[in-house]
Image: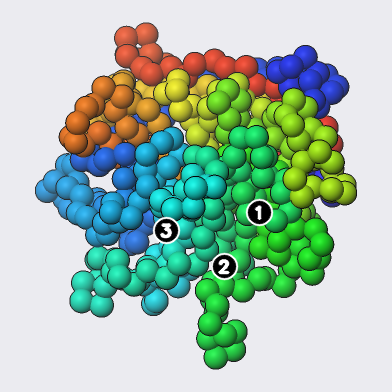
Amino acid sequence: MFCCHCGGGPFGGGPFGGSSTVATALPTRFLCMTLQTDLLQNPVALVQVAPGRLMVAERDGKVQLVDLTSPDQRLSQPEVVLDLSDKVFSKGDHMGLLSITLHPRFRTNGFVFIMYSADTDDREFHHRQLISRFTLSSSNATEIDRFSELVILEIYQSAPTGGQIWFGSDDHILYIAVGDGSRARRRRFDRGSFSGKILRINVDVDPARDGNVPYKIPDDNPFAHQPSTLLPEVFAYGLRNPWRCSEHEQRRESKKGISSCSGTGTARIVCVDVGSKFSDFNIIQKGGMYGWLDEAFSPCHDLESCRNTTKLKSEFKLPICRYLGIAVGGLIYSPWNAYLFADYLRRSFHYLKSTHSGTTWLRGSVEIIDNATTCGPDHSSLSDQTILNLQQTPDKELYVLTVSTDQTGDEPNGHLYRISAPKADAQIKSVRSRQTSLTATISLILCTALQTTMFRF
């Protein structure tokens, strides 16, 4: 049983070796965008607390409640429900309030989990990353009690780095994506560090049974019973900056309903590992080691020369695709049965789709239609905005978070858009010649699978 991998690379064979197939031959797809609010400040993530009601996390430390159910208000007026701006350290890229997720039993326990950067007095490190649990206020069900904070995990980082938290859809375990937070040290392979890893912990603890601990180790974690290898919290490792991950149900399941990738049910995890020039799309395997795109050129190409990596003999898990650009992942868009993602700098959308044989991954371009006939009177376009996140809510609504590049001062610069399918293709073709559209920039992607896949988009 194999997962999809990407052969070749933009280095003429490069670290992966072998030949490459240039991703072409997929038709251009079309989407519409509708502005929901433009009164946010550096929005980075969102969760749905009820149909039409979203909590949006802002990089500077606030969580805003956006109510999209009001019929008499076209653009929603956000309401601050949590303010951690005095705690959040947001000076630098990949810093600040990074991620927010709800406990699977949120409606009964009111637990909200947040990942954020905090300052540190330890001169050896640049900052700390905190994963904390908060609880809804007992006096106001729409507010989060900032004094209810319970720090679940604290990670010391040597340089700015991103991260994300989410609960597994089939195991209700908390997953934590952590960047390697270092330059020369390459902690992604460090056996004694949480950096550069996907962590997996159980936050449903019973003090009477488990003692006074914020979490416990799932018994089926890959290194739970191997103390000489990696920390027991580690689920996968060798990542640079897993800025965005998402879970998807696989179309074909292995026997007994266990995913050959995640090893924990029928869902699989796709993470976009981001660098300054390239992005790797990885399907995260239980216990997998990911060499990142510079594995042939970094100080850790020879693992024996790196700190705490002696005798690590696992093989690198190769990405299904390597993208020339800074990718913002991403999710499975079911109408296309394809993986939809964005480009941070090019302000564009793309999609990936595997062939029927699963041996090649192809890229297609996406156009955001700016035409009232096709998309309705409230249609929008991105123009001067940078894409920060692309998310799907449990009711299958797609949202995009953006920030204006020409905004200055303390004025709101963040936007929330809803993505929807346009009207029939025939109508699209009839207006394309006279519309103004944001056309996805064509980028080079080399996406050849090295092994046969059991499942595909």
Q: Amino acid at mark 3?
A: Ile
95 vs 268, nearest the viewer: 95
Pointer 2 local density, CA inside 10 Å: few below 14, some 14–19, many at least 20? some
Secondary structure at numbered mark 1: loop
* Residue 388 appears anywhere in the view: yes
**Residue 75 place in picture, x, y as percent:** 18, 42
For residue 139, which quarter of the picture? bottom left
Marks 3 and 1 close (CB-CB < 8 Å): no
Per the model, the C-alpha gap separating discs 3 and 2 is: 16 Å
Amino acid tagged 1 = Ser
Task: Name the residue: 74% across, 17% down.
Answer: 11
The front one of 345 and 418 is 345
- Coloured how? rainbow
Q: Which residue is mark 2?
A: 172
Q: Which residue is mark 1?
A: 193
Discs 3, 2 touching: Cβ within 8 Å: no
Give the mark nearer the N terminus: 2 vs 1. 2
Label 3, on which residue?
A: 114
Answer left or right for 340 relative to 429: right
- Callout 2 secondary element: loop
Name the amino acid type tagged 2.
Answer: His
Image side of residue 134 versus residue 62, left or right: right
First-in-chain label (3 vs 2): 3
Image check: 63 left or right of 100?
left
Q: Quadrant of the C terminus?
A: top right
Residue at the outermost bottom position: 208
Q: Position of residue 115 (x, y in %)?
A: 45, 55
